[in-house]
Image (cartoon, coloured by chain):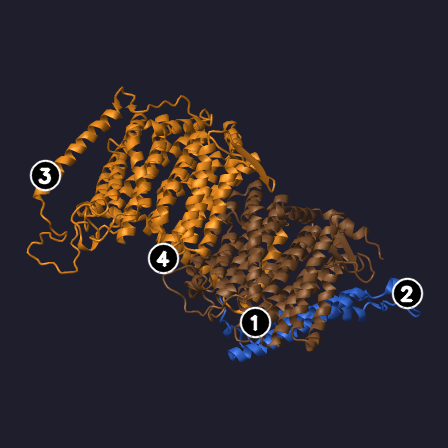
Amino acid sequence: MNISPVHYIALPLLAAFLIPLLSKLHKELARIVPGLVFLYFLVISVVLMQRLETQPMISEVIAGWSAPWGINLVFTPFSGFLVSLMSFIGFLVWVYSYHFKKIDYMPAQKYFILLMMLVTGSIGIVLTGDIFNLFVFLEIVAISAYSLTAFYPGRDGAEAAFKYLLVGSFASALILLAIVILYTQTGTLNMADLAVKMHEVPHYLKVIIFVLFLVGFGIEAEMFPLNGWAPDAYSQAPGPIGAVFAGIVVKGGIYALVRVVYTIFDLSGVGTILIALGLVTMIIAELAALRQDNLKRMLAYSSIGQMGVVLIAFGIGTDTAIFAALFLMLNHALIKSMLFFSASYLLYNSTTKTIKELTGMAKHLPFVSFIFALGAFAIVGLPPFSGFWSKLYFLMAAADAQMVLLIITVLSVSVIEIIYYFRVIGKIYSKDETSELEPKKPTINSVLVMTVLGALIIIIGVYPDLVTDWIHHASDALVNKSNYIQNVLTENLPR
Amino acid sequence: MNTLALIILIFFSGATLAYLSSLISNKLPGWVALLTTMTGTVLFYMSFQNEQALSFSIIGLNLEWALDNYTILFAHIIFGLGILASLYSVQYMQNKSQQGSFYANFLLSIGSMFGIIISKDFISFFIFWEIMTWSSFLIVVWNGIGFRKNGIWYMAMSAIGAYAMLTAIVLINSEIGTYSLQAFFNAVQENAIDNLMLVSILLLIGFAVKAALMPLHIWAPRAYSNTPASYTSVFSGALSKMGVFGMGLVLIRVFRFSGLQDNFDYALVSQFTSHVLAWLGGITAAIATLYALVQKDAKKLLAYSSIAQLGYIVIGLAIGTKLAVMSALFLAIMHAVFKGALFMAVGAVERQVGTTDMTKISGLIRRMPWTFFVTLVSIIALAGVPPLSGFVGKWMLYEALITNGNFFLVVVVFFSSTAAFLYSYRILFGLFLGQEEDDTAHVKEAPATMVIPMVILALFLIVTGTYPGIVFEPIAHGMEYLGFTDVTWNMTVLSNVWGDSVNLQYVSTTIGVAFMLALIFLTFKGRKGTRGVSTKDISTSGEIPLEHENLTFQLDFFKPFERAAAPLYKRSITKIYEDVANGLEALFDFTRKIYTGNGQTYAIYVVAFLVTLLIVVQNML
Amino acid sequence: MDFDFQNIVTISVYGSAIALILIGIYAVLIKKHLIKIVIGMSLVDAGLHLLFVAIGYINNGTAPIFSPGYEDAATNMVDPVPQALVLTAIVIGFAVTAVALSLVIRLYKHHGTVRIDEIKSLKW
């Protein structure tokens, strides 16, 4: 079978349809099939990344209509990087939550279908070359995310999901409006074609479209002040879904934003706006995290803060900065999902999910506590863990752009980050008193996942060259806009 | 394989091994650590005479490691203390749990200290610096008690320092396009760095935190007194010297020998900075000494004393004349030795008696004679009294200050070293002299593996008191690396610019003989006329003290003094920091209120944000 | 023809699209009742869809089909793309509304109220 990017989309959709039927045959299939899909994602990623060695990008045309008329999927080193990352995290989440709702399989079946849709939607956002198609994938992500947030009837999930939905429907309305205006002006929906025809659009309309996109995707990318839904959703969704939000969904939002800014628009001065927005996002989020007493909300705010840094890096926009931004995204995906994985075990039987209840948890759950501490060390950027290098490159980019004040601000905020993360570690390892929580021993597969992530964090920290080539290709592909346009528009004749 | 890389590798893999071995038995990690430090030390001493360098690249950044004389000077401190402390540690930690994580971090911090000094580029320097920080942090919080008070402050202050340093590093890189230290020094010489002052000050802040310079010292007393004694000796002796190491590079290599003294602005600012630092050092020495005086816990006392001693060293480096730097480096080494010995001695008391509270212990001299001996020698060195080596360092420091015209600083230093007598006397008296308490009657001397390292350090102090040249030799070489030329030194004779000279051999012989005679006399005399009284047998003016009232003389030892300096103690710097931190936290906490919890508010934010952006951006783009 | 019936239709279509959007936004931002908010969201969606279709429409245009009877399709056809897109968007809007309504039911069961300003257990 000829492997192509379409499989990323087609296969899980088919599987989602088949799972309810298959699970009638055997209940276990509802768990196994999504895993097979994720495994296949990994295989496609490897094969396609290999193929990118010989050709600049793979553009797959759907239904025989070549770009700019048909919908196409574009697998560039940049999107390939994100897609592989998402597939990897998705697979880990599946392994981690294999035993989720072991006893009653109906919720588990829903969970796995929604999880698969969430990952597929995010991958679709990254792969598609069509702006309306991107909107559709964004909605797939959104709807599955709403449902997953409200997954537990016992918690305040519905409240979080409703807030998410309320804000999210604004996002989709704004994006749809932007697409409508864009279509009236250019008559095309293909992103490469849009980029070519962008100069036909009057300037004031261009700005309006840009702002609509910025706000719309900004909601998914957790930009301040559009991120009120995020801490609620992160804290109410099932534990592994927090990892998916932080590791996969946000990345999709950021991708969409970046694709719009870098490929479609040619506005100068956008960088400054992104820097300003990123800075505000980062500062507010980290300050809000400082006194947070709910662990998962704290992690969520920290996640938002990290996304702020990524936005700043994209705003600076030099080669080093984009490299740093992608490296930050990679690290954030790995580390934050590890933190969510370990945090959900630390808080397994807690009803309030507060940090207070963690006192002395290390005694009961030494491995999980160790993993959490490792994640905290890595996310604040202590060497020799992977978070250090991305931070270093980010600072280098800022220094090259002569932004001393920016460096100082980011680092001051990092001190705050260190304080709140280390407070939690202190609580976990405290011997002053011990928690009354009934700890749940981690299952073997979750231990495996956490070990893999922990090892990766250390390995990348010690030997970053392992991934930097990858990231370099990705950032080159993003910066090289004309290459993208040319390849999408000319080299793909209908089959 | 390159020896430098091998040593680093040995320490880091030793750390892993120590942790893993604790899974088998809690006793193993200590031995693993000892073996690791021994291998590392032997490897170092076998090869440090040879030229060694290693360079490799990681994500396109060139990292270079090499040995030079300045490095070797500090390597002596690290390996010397490291091996003694790990020997001491085996028995000291005997009955404690979770030795695996302790020893893993112990080895990591020693390895990373070595990494710091061999780094010839900022990236590996910073990486090792951070590893050292978090590994020592993990030891500070190792016992899991009082994390909020001890650990957070240490980590937060370290982070501030490290990030100041990181800012400087990336700024340097953006200017000269490389992280190499040598390239930085060259660029400084060629006046190629625009914001050199900003960069240097940021670097100095980074180093000052580790050197516990006021007002960045607040982490130190708590962190020092909260670590197991076997590590405190390394912590205070070697780890704090990493700050001194870096300061030496900036203050001497950059400020003094940058070849830019003709640049008027530059010279002015660098001199001003040096002056400020010298004064901060002086203030640190004075205030920390005052705090040391009133401590009731021996470990806390030593912690404050460490801060004070580091103050002298900073003064010396900041003054920056040949003599001043020599005295600073000499004091640095001596401080490592005697403070290492003192922390070990106090640790021995802690292990044998169970507490280091001086109001609860007394009269241990007969129970722990070796420990007493070590303490005695160390505090003589600490107080800077002849014939021990502390005197030599102080002598040079005074001379350097006077010849440089810093008379006021002389007064400060003189005041604080006089006050140092008081607290060092207190520690000796409090723990070892006086009447024996009944409940310490069963106490035995610490085991041999703990006593031997202490005694080695004490003997080193005695020998260098007479032959300071042993230490001067590596210092002189190290100073040549910093840029000084014609560094002269003498094995046993101290001389000053005014033509006076002291032959230390005579001094120590005379004092030694006098001491022996006095000892013999007192022993014979003391045999007859002593009457056994309890420590609590104090005149109480007719009032009968209750049973539980603690009447040990250690309580309110320096009461009159305390009363005199009361206003100073009241305005504690720590308190100010804590108030500021709490205030900031409350302020920051307020920002959270933006997230009201009402979904509709969030929707309003979206619309308001959209409208604002439409207006703002329309004008901007 | 000065007084153009087509023009009136066009204007009223655009006008009602915009009116729908504004009413929807008003409901979402001001109304406290969860159901009303959901209705508001649907109205915004409906307005957008209407707008999109209106944009693609050409006066007296033909269906975009190339077959006998539609000879002028190449020059005078209604743009089919917006219609296709709107169909998709309607489906999405339907799904979102369904999820929203089910959430409202869940919220009512959990909190015993349908006023959005009383459901604030997650904050800060």
To which residue does mark 1 refer?
Answer: C30
Quadrant in which the C terminus of chain A appears: bottom right
Q: Is residue C95 above or below residue B181?
A: below
* Helix, strand or loop status at disc 4: loop
Q: Is residue A176 visible?
A: no
According to the picture, the residue beneath numbered tag 4 turns out to be B145
Residue A300 x %, y %? 53, 61
| Vertical side of A404 occupied by A175: above or below | below
Tell me the element at label 3. Answer: helix
Q: Quadrant of residue B406?
A: top left
Local crowd size for mark 2, using a 10 Å CA cut-off: few (<14), some (14–19), many (≥20) = some
Chain letter for the part of the structure drawn in blue: C
Residue at numbered disc 3: B525
Q: Which mark is residue A317?
A: none
Q: Secondary structure at mark 1?
A: helix
* Gap between marks 4 and 3 measured at Cα: 48 Å
Front position in the image: B523 or B316 = B523
Q: Which chain is orange?
A: B
- Rendered location of residue A232, percent (x, y): 53, 66
